[in-house]
Amino acid sequence: MHCPKCQSAAVTVIPAEVRLYRNTPRTLSHPPMTPSPDIQVCLDCGWSEFSIPSSWMEAGWLRPLRPQASKTVPLRPSAAA
Protein backbone atom coordinates (compact mmCIF):
# COMPACT_ATOMS: atom_id res chain seq x y z
CA MET A 1 0.00 0.00 0.00
CA HIS A 2 1.11 3.55 -0.67
CA CYS A 3 0.33 6.62 1.42
CA PRO A 4 -2.40 8.72 -0.24
CA LYS A 5 -0.81 11.93 1.09
CA CYS A 6 2.91 11.57 0.20
CA GLN A 7 2.88 8.40 -1.98
CA SER A 8 5.46 6.72 0.30
CA ALA A 9 5.55 2.94 0.52
CA ALA A 10 6.51 3.13 4.21
CA VAL A 11 3.01 2.37 5.53
CA THR A 12 2.67 0.02 8.46
CA VAL A 13 -0.27 -1.39 10.44
CA ILE A 14 -0.41 -0.78 14.18
CA PRO A 15 -2.97 -2.46 16.47
CA ALA A 16 -4.81 0.10 18.55
CA GLU A 17 -7.59 0.57 21.05
CA VAL A 18 -10.17 3.27 20.39
CA ARG A 19 -13.02 4.43 22.60
CA LEU A 20 -16.14 5.71 20.83
CA TYR A 21 -18.98 7.58 22.51
CA ARG A 22 -22.46 7.99 21.09
CA ASN A 23 -23.26 11.68 20.99
CA THR A 24 -27.02 11.93 20.98
CA PRO A 25 -29.33 12.89 23.85
CA ARG A 26 -31.15 9.56 23.88
CA THR A 27 -27.93 7.49 24.10
CA LEU A 28 -25.99 9.38 26.78
CA SER A 29 -26.55 6.50 29.18
CA HIS A 30 -24.83 4.01 26.85
CA PRO A 31 -21.32 2.96 27.85
CA PRO A 32 -18.50 3.78 25.42
CA MET A 33 -17.66 1.25 22.71
CA THR A 34 -14.13 -0.06 22.45
CA PRO A 35 -13.48 -1.63 19.05
CA SER A 36 -9.92 -2.70 18.38
CA PRO A 37 -9.13 -1.45 14.89
CA ASP A 38 -5.83 -1.71 13.10
CA ILE A 39 -4.46 1.74 12.25
CA GLN A 40 -2.48 2.25 9.05
CA VAL A 41 0.29 4.80 9.61
CA CYS A 42 2.72 6.34 7.13
CA LEU A 43 6.16 6.37 8.70
CA ASP A 44 7.26 9.31 6.55
CA CYS A 45 4.50 11.93 6.88
CA GLY A 46 2.35 10.62 9.76
CA TRP A 47 -0.85 10.12 7.76
CA SER A 48 -3.08 7.59 9.46
CA GLU A 49 -6.39 5.83 8.87
CA PHE A 50 -8.53 3.30 10.69
CA SER A 51 -11.83 1.59 10.09
CA ILE A 52 -14.29 0.01 12.46
CA PRO A 53 -14.31 -3.82 12.19
CA SER A 54 -17.18 -5.08 10.03
CA SER A 55 -18.46 -7.26 12.88
CA TRP A 56 -19.21 -4.09 14.88
CA MET A 57 -20.96 -2.48 11.94
CA GLU A 58 -23.05 -5.59 11.27
CA ALA A 59 -24.11 -5.68 14.92
CA GLY A 60 -25.54 -2.15 14.66
CA TRP A 61 -23.16 -0.47 17.12
CA LEU A 62 -23.00 2.84 15.29
CA ARG A 63 -26.55 3.05 14.01
CA PRO A 64 -29.67 0.93 14.21
CA LEU A 65 -29.79 -2.09 11.98
CA ARG A 66 -31.63 -1.36 8.78
CA PRO A 67 -34.01 -4.00 7.47
CA GLN A 68 -32.68 -5.66 4.36
CA ALA A 69 -34.42 -4.15 1.35
CA SER A 70 -35.99 -6.70 -0.91
CA LYS A 71 -34.97 -6.47 -4.50
CA THR A 72 -37.78 -5.28 -6.69
CA VAL A 73 -37.94 -4.92 -10.41
CA PRO A 74 -38.89 -1.40 -11.47
CA LEU A 75 -41.98 -1.15 -13.61
CA ARG A 76 -41.54 0.14 -17.10
CA PRO A 77 -43.91 2.86 -18.19
CA SER A 78 -46.27 1.82 -20.98
CA ALA A 79 -45.39 3.09 -24.41
CA ALA A 80 -47.94 5.63 -25.61
CA ALA A 81 -49.74 4.56 -28.80
Image: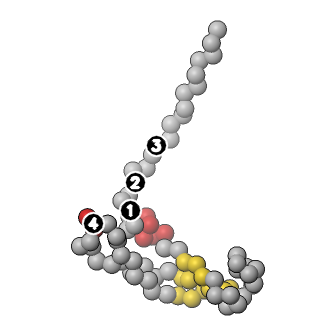
Name the residue type under label 4: Pro
Residue 41 appears left or right of 73 = right
Residue 55 appears in view: yes
In the picture, residue 24 is in which quadrant? bottom left
**Residue in the foreground of this view, choosing between 22 and 56:** 22
Mark found first going from the N terminus, 4 or 1: 4
Amino acid carrying mark 1 in the image: Arg
Question: Which label sits in the foreground, 4 or 1?
Answer: 4
Q: Secondary structure at mark 3?
A: loop
Q: Going by the picture, which residue comes out furthest to the bottom?
A: 43
Label 4 and label 3: CA atoms lie apart by: 32 Å
Whether the residues at callouts 2 and 1 have beta carbons within 8 Å, the answer is: yes
Residue at x 23% of width, y 73% of height: 29
- The residues bearing labels 2 and 1 have C-alpha atoms spaced at a distance of 9 Å
For the residues labelled 2 and 3, the Cα–Cα distance comes to: 12 Å
Give the x, y percent position of residue 62.
40, 67
**Which residue does the numbered mark 1 point to in the structure image?**
63
Of the numbered discs 3 and 1, the one sitting upstream in the chain is 1
The image shows residue 11 at horizontal and vertical percentages of: 68, 85
Mark closer to the observer (4, 3) = 4
Query: Distance of mark 4 from mark 1, alpha carbons?
Result: 14 Å
Q: Residue at x 70, y 90 (%)?
A: 44
Q: Closer to the camera, 14 or 19?
A: 19
| Label annotation for residue 25 | 4
Q: CA distance from mark 4 to mark 2?
A: 21 Å
The residue singled out by tag 3 in the image is 70
Mark number, residue 66: 2
Q: Label 1 crowding class (10 Å Cα cut-off): few <14, some 14-19, many 20+?
A: few
On screen, 71 above or below 3? above
Q: Give the SS element for disc 4.
A: helix
Toward which corner of the image does residue 64 lie, by quadrant?
A: bottom left
